[in-house]
Structures are given as C-alpha cells and as structure tokens.
C-alpha cells in the first residue's frame, strides 16, 4: 500500500483545537512561508543564507563584519596555532552553489592583519591634520537623517498597527479553517509592511544628529 498526499480540497480541518497547541498559528504560518520561499529559490537562495550567531567564549572584535571575497558570506572566527583567524569553509556551502567554482577549501584571514590595517585607517582618519575633513564627512552623512520628524514617527506607528491588525485577521481566518496556502501572498505582504514599519521606528528612536560645532568640540578636544 502506498500513501498519497490528499488534494487540498479533500483535507478535513477541525474548526476547534483537537489537541494542545505545540506552536502558535503565527509561528506555523511564518515557518510555512519561510520554507516555501527557500524552496522556491533553490540552491541560489540557500547559498545566500547568512551564518547564524554562535555562542563562544572567545571575543572576536570583527565578528560578523568580515566577508569572504569568493562567496560574500560572513566569515567565522577561529583560533589556530595561538593566533586568531576568520575562516570561510567550503564544506558549509550548499552543494551545487555557483560560488563553489574557484572557492578554496578554506579561506583564512589573520585577525592581526585586519585589525592592524583598520587601526592605521582610523589613526589617519582622526589625525589632527585630517580632523576638519572627518568632521565635514560626518556632518554630510547625517543630511539624509533630518527627515525623521514626529509626523514620520506617527505615520510609521500607524503603518505598524495596520500591518499587525492584518496579520491578526489572517491568523483568525486560518484558525477558523481557511487554507494557509491561499493567503500566502497577503500574509507575506503584511509581514513585509510590519518589518518596514518596525525598522523605521527603531531608526527614529536611535537617531541622533550631531551638528558641526559639537563634532568639532568632540574631536578637537579629545584626550590624547
């Protein structure tokens, strides 16, 4: 006997919970959407997935900031022969990924070499003779941030509330027996709207612009 998957229209769903819930409806829908999005992208989509953070007892100053020049993935910190390196191992890539072509088995970047170059750049950037140029660059980089007004925050809050309201209605519909696959696009759009609104609010909350006078005072009178 061979079991076959029933067609969606023949699946019987209970309108009332038949057993204690293991996960929430929201978690289930998000997992289904994530699985479908990755499966649709094939190997190319899997190759782009970022490495997740790992618990470690060591401190890596450049953790999450170093990328492999072959595949553009984040490199992981690793101790080797009393020194610290950032490594990209080809064995952790998805089989068949295009980036495998020409990728060495392991790519190592000595932390000392990276931090030495970084410190040299920072010392040059904040040297006495370059302070004025650095201040000008800092002030110019904040020109685009002045659009963060209370009205913009209120609009972002409103969009966030609307997106969360849509998601709650979708969850209620699924709990009532609606097929989740019929609402994938609508839920995807609502989740994207919620993420965008949350990012807008977080940026507005942490945004602090600094005028040229404040930057001059900070950099010209810093302790030596």
Image (tube, rainbow, N blue to C red):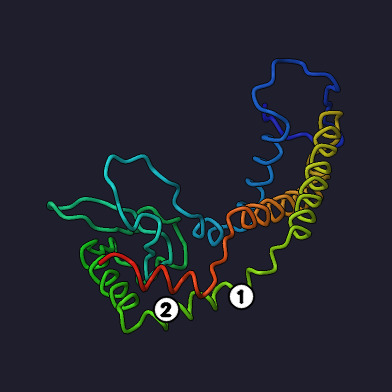
The residue depicted at 49 percent of the width and 69 percent of the height is: 214
Q: Is mark 1 on a helix, strand or loop?
A: helix
Task: Tell me, yes or no, whether the two marked residues, 2 and 1, touch with CB atoms within 8 Å.
Answer: no
**Front position in the image: 139 or 81:** 139
Q: What element carries label 2?
A: helix
Q: Give the quadrant of residue 84.
A: bottom left
Quarter of the picture holding the N terminus: top right
> Where does the image place residue 79, in percent across and percent down from the top left?
21, 50
Judging by the rendered image, the residue that carries numbered circle 2 is 134
User: In the picture shown, does residue 154 fall above or below 168?
Assistant: below
Say whether residue 159 is left or right of residue 21. Answer: right
Dot 2 or dot 1: first in sequence order is 2
Residue at the farthest left position? 81
Neighbour class for label 2 at 10 Å: few (<14), some, many (≥20)?
A: some
The residue depicted at 29 percent of the width and 58 percent of the height is: 87
Neighbour class for label 1 at 10 Å: few (<14), some, many (≥20)?
A: few
User: In the picture shown, does residue 100 fall above or below 32?
Assistant: below
Say whether residue 100 is left or right of residue 59. Answer: right
Q: Give the quadrant of residue 161.
A: top right
Disc 2 from disc 1: Cα separation: 15 Å
User: In the picture shown, does residue 93 fall above or below 212?
Assistant: above
> Where does the image place residue 12, in percent across and percent down from the top left?
84, 26
Q: Residue 143 carries which label?
A: 1
The residue depicted at 78 percent of the width and 43 percent of the height is: 164
**Front position in the image: 157 or 80:** 157
**Front position in the image: 94 or 172:** 172
> Where does the image place residue 29, in percent across and percent down from the top left?
71, 38
């Amino acid at each position: 006997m061979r079991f076959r998957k029933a067609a969606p229209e023949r699946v019987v769903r209970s309108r009332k919970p038949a057993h204690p819930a293991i996960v929430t409806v929201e978690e289930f829908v998000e997992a289904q959407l994530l699985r479908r999005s990755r499966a649709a992208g094939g190997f190319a989509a899997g190759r782009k997935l970022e490495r997740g953070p790992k618990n470690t007892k060591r401190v890596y100053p450049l953790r999450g900031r170093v990328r492999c020049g072959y595949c553009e993935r984040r490199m992981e910190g690793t101790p080797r022969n009393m020194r610290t390196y950032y490594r990209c191992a080809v064995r952790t890539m998805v089989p068949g990924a295009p980036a495998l072509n020409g990728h060495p088995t392991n790519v190592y970047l000595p932390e000392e070499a990276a931090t030495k170059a970084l410190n040299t750049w920072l010392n040059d950037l904040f040297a006495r003779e370059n302070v004025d140029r650095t201040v000008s660059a800092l002030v110019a980089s904040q020109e685009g941030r002045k659009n963060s007004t209370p009205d913009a925050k209120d609009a972002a809050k409103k969009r966030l509330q609307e997106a969360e309201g849509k998601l709650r209605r979708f969850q209620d519909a699924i709990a009532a027996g609606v097929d989740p696959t019929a609402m994938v696009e609508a839920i995807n759009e609502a989740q994207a709207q919620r993420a965008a609104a949350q990012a807008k609010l977080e940026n507005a909350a942490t945004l602090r612009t600094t005028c040229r006078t404040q930057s001059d005072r900070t950099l010209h009178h810093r302790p030596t």
